[in-house]
Image (cartoon, rainbow, N blue to C red):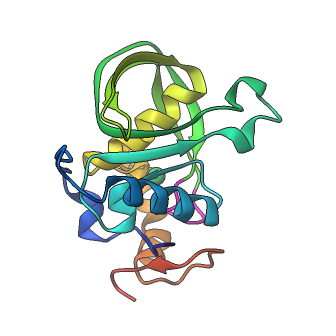
């Protein structure tokens, strides 16, 4: 099922999510729906709050970027109850977009390397280190689980310049190829 994507201004995007219980019955279906919603919107990452659910889950599919970077071909993963336990290395600047901030791209500093613990949909536990672009995407999606959006990292001046655009997004005055749920529409 394809969900509408919640956009800037929706309080769900500002809530800290809770871990999914191992007895939660709908996990496979939830992850399947998240992949379907993300692919429909041509995104490479999607966190549960972006479909209106305050759970600690995000999905990532970097295979569309494999033409530029062949190593990303098989990077299709669901992260259940992820916790970043270390961040290190240089902070690298690169522009980012977000399905909940349609039309916006801004430069964001991210750590080059992270260590993250998470489960897959079979509750197998992983403790892995990721670097570079993958680490960036995971930090972006992880932020969503803690109520953080990339515009939060912009300078006060930049934020002031973006204010009108953000208001438009929250009112649904924005063109998207996917269905959105705007809080002030
Ligand atoms: Ni995002």
Residue that sits furthest to the top in the current view: 89
- 30 in the magenta segment: no
Task: Return the residue nearer the eye: 134 or 31.
Answer: 31
Point out residue 95 in the picture as x, y percentages from the top left corner.
60, 41
Within the image, what quadrant is residue 68 found in? top right
Whether 113 is drawn above or below 1: the answer is above
Q: Is residue 134 left or right of residue 7?
A: right
Residue 1 visible in this rendered orientation of the protein: yes
Task: Return the residue nearer the eye: 112 or 59.
Answer: 59
Q: How many marks?
A: 0
Whether 137 is drawn above or below 24: the answer is above
* Magenta stretch in the rendered image: 98-104
Q: Is residue 160 left or right of residue 36?
A: left
Task: Return the residue nearer the eye: 124 or 117.
Answer: 124
- Residue at 37%, 41% (x, y): give it: 121
Q: Is residue 175 left or right of residue 5?
A: right
Whether 70 is drawn above or below 158: the answer is above
Task: Return the residue nearer the eye: 98 or 32.
Answer: 32
Point out residue 85 in the picture as x, y percentages from the top left corner.
26, 20
What's the magenta bit mostly, secondary-structure-wise?
loop
- Residue at 42%, 67% (x, y): give it: 163
- 99 in the magenta segment: yes
- Residue at 32%, 40% (x, y): give it: 80
Point out residue 150 in the picture as x, y percentages from the top left corner.
42, 47
Residue that sits furthest to the bottom in the current view: 185
């Amino acid at each position: 099922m394809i969900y509408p994507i919640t956009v800037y201004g929706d309080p769900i995007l500002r809530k800290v999510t809770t871990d999914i219980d191992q007895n939660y019955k709908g996990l496979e279906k939830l992850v399947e729906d998240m992949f379907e919603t993300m692919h429909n919107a041509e995104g490479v990452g999607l966190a549960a709050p972006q479909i209106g659910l305050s759970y600690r889950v995000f999905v990532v599919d970097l295979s569309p970027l494999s033409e530029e970077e062949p190593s990303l071909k098989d990077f299709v993963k669901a992260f259940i109850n992820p916790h970043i336990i270390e961040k290190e290395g240089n902070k690298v600047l690169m522009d980012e977009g977000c399905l909940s901030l349609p039309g916006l791209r801004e430069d964001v500093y991210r750590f080059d390397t992270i260590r993250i613990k998470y489960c897959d949909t079979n509750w197998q536990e992983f403790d892995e280190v990721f670097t570079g672009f993958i680490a960036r995407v995971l930090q972006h999606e992880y932020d969503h689980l803690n109520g953080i959006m990339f515009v939060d990292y912009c300078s006060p001046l930049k934020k002031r310049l973006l204010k009108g655009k953000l208001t438009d997004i929250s009112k649904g005055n924005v063109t998207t190829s996917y269905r959105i749920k705007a809080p002030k529409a």
